[in-house]
Image (cartoon, rainbow, N blue to C red):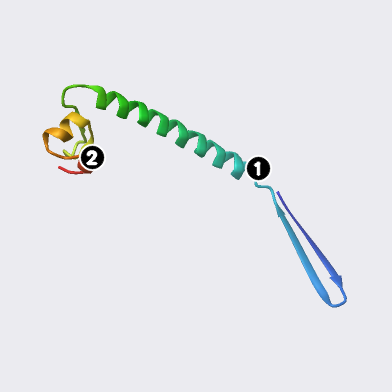
């Protein structure tokens, strides 16, 4: 929804435009909720991976690491498992 009002007073023109941003705000809120849920799930996955006593890794179809656990990183003498993400 938009509305425009033009008023001429003392040789000045005023233009006022209103936009309905309800749908935009609802979309932004949905995205924020989805991102929060994704972060929560990522935290659960990280906790699960790091609590396995054995080496765990996930690779994509191009053989790049998607995730590795702490045991896997430690076996490669790497402190942070995230350093391996994206590597072949």
Which residue is found at the position 19% from the left and 27% from the top? 56
Q: Does residue 60 lie above or below 50 as drawn?
A: below
Q: Nearer the viewer, residue 25 or 55?
A: 55
* Dot placed on the residue nearer the N-terminal end, 1 or 2: 1
The residue lying at 29 percent from left, 23 percent from top is 48
- Residue identified by numbered label 1: 22
Q: Is 37 on the left-hand or right-hand side of 23?
A: left
Which element is circle 1 on?
Answer: helix
Real-space CA distance between mark 1 and mark 2, rounded to the nearest whole angstrom = 42 Å
Disc assigned to residue 80? 2
Q: Is 9 situated above or below 32? A: below
Position of residue 53 relative to residue 7, above or below, is above
Q: Quadrant of the C terminus?
A: top left
Total labels: the figure holds 2
Query: Which is nearer the eye, 13 or 52?
Result: 52
Residue 14: x and y in percent read: 79, 68
**In this image, 26 relative to 14: left or right?**
left
Question: Could you classify mark 2 by the number of other residues whose Cα lies within 10 Å: few (under 14), some (14-19), or many (20 or more)?
Answer: few
The residue depicted at 60 percent of the width and 43 percent of the height is 25
**In the rendered image, which quarter is residue 4 located in?**
bottom right
Residue 75 x %, y %: 12, 33
Name the secondary structure under disc 2.
loop
């Amino acid at each position: 929804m938009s509305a425009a009002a033009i008023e001429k007073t003392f040789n000045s023109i005023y233009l006022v435009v209103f936009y309905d941003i309800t749908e935009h705000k609802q979309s932004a809120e949905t995205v924020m909720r989805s991102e929060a849920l994704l972060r929560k799930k990522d935290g659960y996955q990280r906790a699960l991976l790091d609590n396995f006593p054995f080496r765990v890794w996930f690779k994509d179809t191009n053989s790049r690491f998607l995730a590795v656990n702490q045991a896997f990183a430690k076996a490669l003498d790497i402190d942070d498992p995230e350093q391996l993400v994206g590597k072949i």
